Image: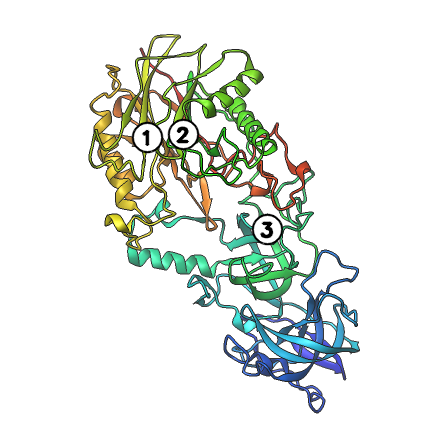
């Protein structure tokens, strides 16, 4: 495939195309010493070694030095990768990981030819040799084997999730020559992991495709073949500094989903990351410096046409009560608290939220995931906001606690430009039996007047049931069509919302309604269809590749803004302000896991939450 012998114990690689561990027949070379087992025989053609538990002696060239207690402090996996003469069999790998512990007696380097004796083990699915002795016997060079995505096949991991099948390349030095896109940063802080994809960033299936079981299965297959994880090459969790956070070509670079990297080289490892808790998948352990390109630059101050701005903003559990593990939150005082775990975290969370709201400069904001108390959660935000922009500029709608969930929705508004028109109204099961308020937060409607011309607008802020937990006990199972858990629960609620607003629940006397919020449904899903069937236009659909959230490495629009027919002609612009979903969570307000507090910038809006705000500009006619 790519390996020729030039001296006993000295190996040279010549890379060529292909996707297997054996490739073409190898150039004739000196046979291995007596008593030596070839690495491809240790690896075998299955997911586990046929020699597991046996003592073997292997020889090969070190292709990746990840030893502990050596000069390279950035790469510490407790061992190194070795590769030897190929067997010409695509089903077997020619590389393997050698584990030699925390204090190895022999310091090896990439390019050393080594002899290793040890026991064959399987460690979370990776075949390894647990070394009892290591001896450097020469030196050599090895070129990485090129791997192009999408992969030829997929397998199910131990969590029954689809991943690319790279078993035939396990432990080998490989090169990904293509441009790959950053698709997820959720595990950057904890495991030093960056999820990458071929062919651009990944989007949720039902963000643009109608729900369908067969097509969704094909989508998942495609996603798996296009994905690989770039690991930091360390086995400890929450290591500081975070390796890839600022690994970019531009000054002041901070990594974001949508950024790109090209031509990365490393050893392929099947692992759960730093220990037993990460995702079981194939990871590239880099053997050279890594540099990203800033393709998806941070957005600046949002620019939206229109004389009146309305925004939807999910705050990721802003609680006025500090979460010390107690169960005294919610209107009944018996729910678990969420959000900040200390006063310091609450100050940081509030600073980020206010920085985002100041730059957003919206006249009306529907807030989601507020602590459901009388007024304290809203009061903290309004007071902090007014301390930045001026006394009494912002006020809140005094709803008090709403039903019995731990979180609620709410409104803040600018008093110089906007006034309240009548009382708020709630949609729950007492109004429409289709609206399951045990699963969905009640819809909150409030009419506002634009003070410049007296125009009236009613805004309805929503937070429908998430996809994260099952509604099967309600007869609403996950049907496997891409819409996830509780789709019928959300769809029924959406249909109820559509009918409710036609009754003018606040008595505004004006047909202009804007339905906003976290609907927990992607653009092509049934709840959005139900709202459109009720005569509303989804303004987010006008955005190319709309998204406000990233889950499982795939972007999609969960946060929406829909206008009634009379309002559509008065819409001047719609913007998804991508300040949160693309940012790594390590930049948020939290202080856990030994995070460096200096990474936080309270004057910056980036990663104020996990959802992007949606901003609508309106030119309201009187």
User: How many C-alpha atoms fall within 10 Å of the one at disc 3: few (<14), some, or many (≥20)?
Assistant: some
Spatial separation of the CA atoms under disc 1 and disc 3: 36 Å
Q: Is residue 304 visible?
A: no
Most foreground residue, 40 or 321: 321
Choose the circle earlier in sequence order: 2 or 1: 2
| SS for dot 3 | helix
Numbered tag placed on residue 341 in the rendering = none
State the residue position of label 2: 372
Q: Nearer the viewer, mark 1 or mark 3?
A: 1
Q: Is residue 173 visible?
A: yes
The residue shown at (24%, 35%) is 435
User: How many C-alpha atoms fall within 10 Å of the one at disc 1: few (<14), some, or many (≥20)?
Assistant: some
State the residue position of label 1: 403
Residue 475 at what x, y percent from top left?
23, 50
Choose the circle earlier in sequence order: 1 or 3: 3
Residue 125 at what x, y percent from top left?
53, 70
Spatial separation of the CA atoms under disc 3 and disc 2: 31 Å
């Amino acid at each position: 495939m790519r390996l020729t012998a030039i001296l006993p114990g000295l190996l040279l690689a010549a890379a060529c195309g292909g996707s297997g561990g054996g490739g073409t027949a190898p150039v004739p070379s000196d046979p291995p010493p007596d008593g030596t087992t070839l690495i491809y025989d240790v690896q075998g053609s299955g997911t586990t070694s046929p020699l597991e538990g046996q003592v073997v002696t292997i020889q090969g060239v070190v292709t990746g030095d990840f030893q502990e207690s050596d000069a390279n402090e950035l790469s510490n996996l407790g061992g190194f990768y070795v590769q030897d003469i190929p067997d010409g069999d695509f089903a077997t790998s020619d590389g393997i990981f050698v584990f030699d512990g925390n204090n190895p007696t022999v310091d090896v380097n990439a390019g050393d030819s080594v002899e290793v004796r040890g026991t064959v083990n399987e460690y979370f699915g990776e075949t390894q040799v647990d070394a009892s002795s290591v001896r450097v016997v020469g030196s050599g060079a090895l070129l990485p084997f090129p791997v192009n995505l999408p992969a030829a096949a997929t397998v199910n991991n131990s969590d029954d999730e689809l991943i690319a099948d790279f078993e035939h390349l396990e432990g080998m030095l490989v090169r990904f020559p293509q441009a790959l896109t950053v698709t997820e940063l959720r595990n950057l802080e904890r495991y030093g992991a960056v999820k990458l994809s071929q062919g651009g960033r990944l989007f949720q299936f039902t963000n643009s495709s109608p729900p369908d079981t067969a097509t969704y299965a094909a989508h998942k297959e495609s996603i798996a073949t296009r994905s690989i994880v770039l690991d930091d090459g360390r086995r400890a969790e929450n290591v500081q500094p975070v390796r890839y956070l600022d690994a970019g070509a531009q000054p002041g670079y901070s990594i974001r989903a949508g950024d790109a990297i090209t031509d990365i080289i490393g050893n392929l490892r099947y692992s759960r990351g730093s220990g037993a808790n990460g995702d079981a998948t194939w990871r590239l352990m880099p053997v050279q410096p890594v540099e990203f390109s800033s393709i998806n630059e941070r957005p600046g101050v949002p620019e939206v046409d229109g004389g009146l701005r309305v925004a939807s903003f999910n705050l990721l559990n802003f609680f006025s009560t500090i979460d010390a593990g107690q169960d005294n939150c919610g209107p009944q005082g018996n729910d678990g608290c969420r959000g900040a775990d200390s006063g310091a975290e609450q100050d940081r969370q509030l600073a980020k939220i206010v920085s985002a709201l100041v730059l957003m400069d919206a006249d009306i904001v529907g807030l989601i995931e507020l602590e459901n108390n009388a007024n304290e959660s809203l009061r903290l935000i309004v007071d902090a906001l007014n301390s930045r922009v001026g006394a009494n500029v912002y006020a809140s709608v005094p709803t008090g606690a709403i039903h019995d969930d731990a979180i609620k929705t709410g409104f803040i508004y600018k008093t110089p430009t906007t006034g309240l028109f009548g009382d708020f109204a709630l949609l729950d099961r007492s109004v429409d039996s289709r609206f399951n308020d045990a699963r969905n937060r009640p819809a909150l409607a409030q009419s506002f007047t634009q003070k410049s011309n007296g125009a009236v607008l009613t805004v309805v802020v929503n937070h429908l049931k998430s996809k994260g937990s099952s509604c099967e006990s309600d007869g609403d199972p996950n049907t496997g069509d891409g819409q996830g858990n509780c789709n019928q629960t959300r769809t029924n609620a959406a249909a109820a919302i559509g009918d409710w607003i036609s009754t003018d629940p606040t008595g505004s006397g004006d047909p202009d309604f804007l339905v906003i919020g976290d609907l927990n449904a992607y653009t092509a899903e049934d709840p959005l269809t139900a709202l459109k069937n009720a005569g509303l236009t989804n303004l987010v659909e006008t955005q190319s590749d709309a998204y406000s959230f990233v889950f499982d490495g795939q972007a999609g629009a969960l946060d929406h803004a829909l206008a009634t027919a009379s309002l559509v002609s008065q819409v001047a612009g719609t913007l998804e302000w991508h300040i949160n979903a693309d940012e790594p969570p390590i930049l948020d307000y939290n202080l856990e896991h030994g995070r460096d507090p200096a990474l936080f910038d309270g004057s910056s809006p980036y990663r104020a939450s996990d959802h992007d705000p949606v901003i609508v500009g309106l030119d309201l006619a009187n």
